[in-house]
Amino acid sequence: MSTPLQIRDAVEADLPALLQLFQTSGLDTAGHGDLVAVREAWWQLSHWPGARVRVAESGGRIIGSLTLFILPMLSHQATPCAVVESVGVDAALQGQGAGRALMEDAMRLAAQAGCYKLALSSNLRRSDAHAFYQHLGFDQHGLSFKVALPEAAS
């Protein structure tokens, strides 16, 4: 990367660039971005205590992002935990440090919030991502399960 990398909180004006990033990183299918829906989700996230969308920016361009949730817990002596979702780096720029910088930033923010752990899940097919997370010090822990839910009735 020829220009310095900056990690910062996303702002609403970043949403079009984030939509594009979600497609170039493989988080979303190309051509299926809905800016109206993303703006609604943005509004909800921006009003949710403990939720932060972080971006990696280089040369004025957003090249990576993740969403960090700091969650209060009743268990673990009421110690909060952190969850990272939607980690994405532009496919053309992967391996140049943006993902590492974003994850280290998330770990720092989680530690500052007093979290006892930072967790994430990753698709079984993403072996490169698994190696990346392990290189950052993450251990495989347990199993992840999901269930598809029917669309909400309008």
Image (cartoon, helix red, strand yellow):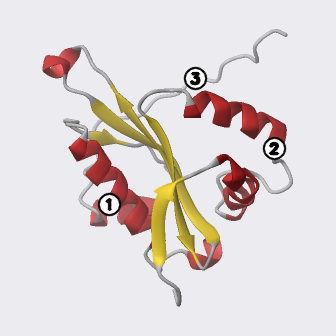
Locate the C terminus by quadrant. top right
Under mark 2, the amino acid is Leu
Quadrant housing residue 77: top left
Asked whether the beta carbons under mark 3 and mark 1 sit within 8 Å of each other, the answer is: no
The residue closer to the viewer here, 139 or 125, is 139
Mark 1: give few (<14), some (14-19) or many (20+) Cα within 10 Å: few
Judge from the rendering whether residue 53 lies leftward or rightward of residue 151; answer left or right: left
Q: Amino acid at mark 1?
A: Glu
Residue at image location 52% in from the left, 27% down from the top: 146
Q: Is residue 10 left or right of residue 133?
A: right
Q: Position of residue 53 (x, y in %)?
A: 52, 46
Q: Which residue is mark 1?
A: 104
Relative to 139, 1 lies left or right: right
Residue 62 makes an appearance in the image: yes
Q: Can residue 125 be seen here?
A: no
* Numbered disc 3: secondary structure: loop
Q: Residues under labels 3 and 1: Cα distance? A: 30 Å
Residue at x-position 70% and y-position 64%:
24
- What residue did someone put label 3 on? 147
Tell me where residue 63 appears, x and y as whole percent: 60, 68
